[in-house]
Image: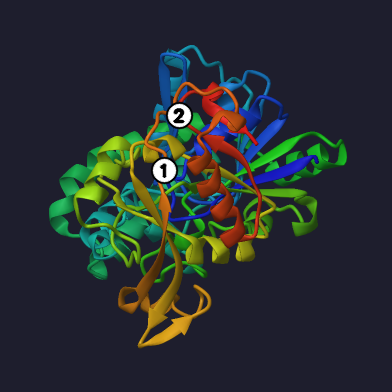
Amino acid sequence: MPVTAVIGGQWGDEGKGKIVDLLGADMDLVARYQGGANAGHTVQTGEQTFILHQIPSGILHPNVRCVLGNGMVIDPIALMEELDSLAANGIDTSDRVLLSTHAHIVTPLHQAMDRATGHIVGTTGRGIGLAYADKARRLGIRAVDLTDIRGLGGYILKRLKLGLNQGEIQKSDLPALKTEIEAFLHACSRMVSLLADTVQVLQEAIDRNDKVLIEGAQGTLLDIDFGTYPFVTSSSSGSGGIASGLGIPPRAVDRVIGIFKAYTTRVGNGPFPTELDDAIGKRLQDSGAEFGATTGRPRRCGWFDAVAGRYSCQVNGIDEIYLSKLDILDRFDELKICTGYTLDGVTIDGFSAAVHRLDKIEPHYETLPGWNASSADLTAAEQLPEAAQNYIGRVEELLGVPVTHVSIGAERNQILKR
């Protein structure tokens, strides 16, 4: 299957970066289709840990080219820092990072506006949503515009004046913005060498039957259309965003892999039906090191939500599931899975019927026995305790999709094939 997509099935932070890194070893090209530096994909290789924000995790494999698609919004300063960090750690990215000429650019102005307003929905403050808003308002700039740095400076000045007039930017921000804009323009001048016609690159790769891996950021429940609006990201993070975010037809995608955590987490604001605001939730948070790779913010934790998971499988067309962080459940005597919702005294069959009122629903739980044994040193899925096997099987039944791989640790060799 030449084209495979990796999609987050929950509220992000499911472990997509690790899976992309694993699959990337056999790929020719890895492409990202949405989001920006608000994503954080953590990959551990031996004693090295890489946190990637905009560059696909496939970059860690020396023969893989990486595409930053037109559906992304790019932070030039952060991208250059990421490239410099990879180089400092012995990763040669020369001629392997291709940036779509049509990708939109996040400026210091967007970040200043986000810092002033983003707390309302719990954004990362990286300016992502404001850059997407300017894209929709026809006020944005695209990567191709970076070839004219003088013209870009003029745009920044014009947009700054508009922001001041509309109250989006405060005069008190100006001293800091002056320094940030200078650094921004310098990063833009460096970034020009990455520009490419990525639509053509991808089409040619598909025509050659190259192995292409598509990497999503965030998760389906944060999708601008299908997530828990307005507490969502600013792009189409589900598989529906692939075609518009990369310029390839939907039929080109042969396989969709959904990444699900063995429990559920959410960072930022918004409803979370299975959230555990108690000692168990704190235990999941501590054991799973549930802190955002981009911001360091603590993630809210709860039991696995099969209602939301089934919805995610449906809207993405997920063919198989990689279940991550199963090892975090190793030391529980019993576990729970949410199998249904009640809203206003009525049983709700699906997530979409309740997505706009999730803060009002009552989850229905099914209790399963835990296995209370370490899985960290296992080398085959067949070695998992019977209770762990049953837990995975129940997830499969409830979601209607096979779980083909299970992660029991941070290392590449701790992903077990079933």
Q: Residues within 10 Å of mark 1 (few under 14, many from 20)?
A: many
**Residue 140, x across and y down, in percent:** 47, 58
Type of amino acid under label 1 = Ala
Q: Is residue 8 above or below residue 337?
A: above
* Quadrant of the image occupied by residue 360: bottom left
Q: Secondary structure at mark 2?
A: loop
Q: Residue furthest right?
A: 208
Q: Secondary structure at mark 1?
A: loop
Looking at the rendering, in which quadrant would you find the C terminus? top right
Mark 1 or mark 2: name the one nearer the start of the chain: 1
- Please give left or right for residue 46 compared with residue 184 in the image: right
- Please give left or right for residue 262 compared with residue 244 in the image: left
Badge 1 vs badge 2, beta-carbon distance below 8 Å: no
Q: Residue furthest left?
A: 172
- Please give left or right for residue 318 compared with residue 343 in the image: right
* Quadrant of the image occupied by residue 341: bottom left
State which mark lies toward you, 1 or 2. 2
Instruction: Please indicate, yes or no, whether residue 379 appears anywhere in the rendered image.
Output: yes
Q: Residue at coordinates 41% horizontally, 22% vertically from top-left? A: 49
**Residue 128, x across and y down, in percent:** 40, 53
| Residue occupied by mark 2 | 375
Q: Residue at coordinates 52% horizontally, 69% vertically from top-left? A: 226
Looking at the image, which is closer to me, 361 or 106? 361
Marks 1 and 2 sit apart, C-alpha to C-alpha, by: 33 Å
Looking at the rendering, in which quadrant would you find the N terminus? top right
Label number found at residue 241: none
Q: Is residue 327 above or below residue 300?
A: above
| Residue occupied by mark 1 | 37
Q: How is the image coloured?
A: rainbow
Type of amino acid under label 2 = Ser
Looking at the image, which is closer to me, 169 or 244? 244
